[in-house]
Amino acid sequence: MSSPRLSRLGDYAWLVTFEPRVDAETSARVLDLAAWVVAQRWAGVRDVVPALTSVAVHLSPECAEAGEVQRRLAEHLAQHTAARDAEGPVIEIAVSYGGPDGPDLAAVADAVQLEPDEVVRRHCAVTYRVFMLGFLPGFPYLGPVDPSIQVPRLAVPRARVPAGSVGVAGQQTGIYPRESPGGWQIIGRTSEVLFDAARTPPARLMPGDRVRLVPLAAPSPHEAA
């Protein structure tokens, strides 16, 4: 496990970069650091943004304590090399796989040389971690996906992906919170509302949450085609 790297991010931010691995250990370190910075309530810190393998600490332009923020970040990183992986409740999301809801399921199954129902079984057998939110408000990057069903993004993204669509791309699976263009391979869809600006918090899933995807019904070969 290598030491994280602290660097300047533009004029008003510091960036802490961890190992470039998308896994539970790296995610725990990222979220642990982000939570610690938020808890410090440093004057001049405008926002703390955890990503897949990094944490950005954004400062207000008028902040006069940028050097002090750097010093305290460096001190904390030198003293804390591991994070406690807190295990919260598992959130279940019901998904309809295949057919119109999963137009790429058959292609994914063909690419990995499995039957569609076996792709679904393996996709639902994992307890996923929400690594981060991004791309769209409330879009959860979940992982890691079983290596046997990992597939790349589409060569040509779709102009329209319906809200609730469940896609896979490499090590990750994600859920589109609203209609948008997108290049992930769509294998299912959920009716769960993942983002509602009138709700507190507005995002249904948050970084660090554990998620299980539950199939509403196994697709038949005819439905998956």
Image (cartoon, grey):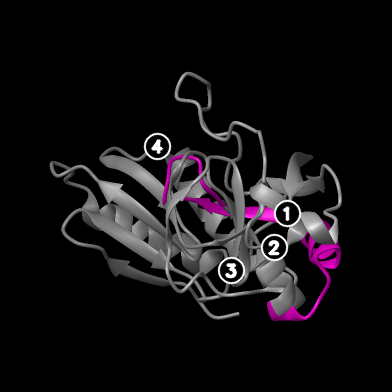
Tell me the kind of residue under disc 3: Thr
Q: Which residue is mark 1?
A: 98
- Residue at 77 percent across and 40 percent down: it is 92
Tell me the kind of residue under disc 4: Arg
Label 4 crowd bin: few (<14), some (14–19), many (20+), radius 10 Å: few
User: Is 20 placed above or below 183 here?
Assistant: below
Q: Quadrant of residue 157?
A: bottom left
- In the picture, the disc for residue 37 is none
Q: Position of residue 162 (x, y in %)?
A: 52, 43
Tell me the kind of residue under disc 1: Gly
| Residue placed most toward the observer, 23 or 110 | 110
Q: Are marks 1 and 2 in contact (CB under 8 Å)?
A: yes
SS under mark 3: loop
Q: Which residue is mark 4?
A: 41
Stretch in magenta:
111-140
- In the picture, the disc for residue 105 is 2
- In three-dimensional space, the C-alpha distance between marks 1 and 3, rounded to whole angstroms, equals 43 Å
Q: Which residue is mark 3?
A: 81
- Residue at 59 percent across and 47 percent down: it is 165
Which label sits in the foreground, 2 or 4?
A: 2
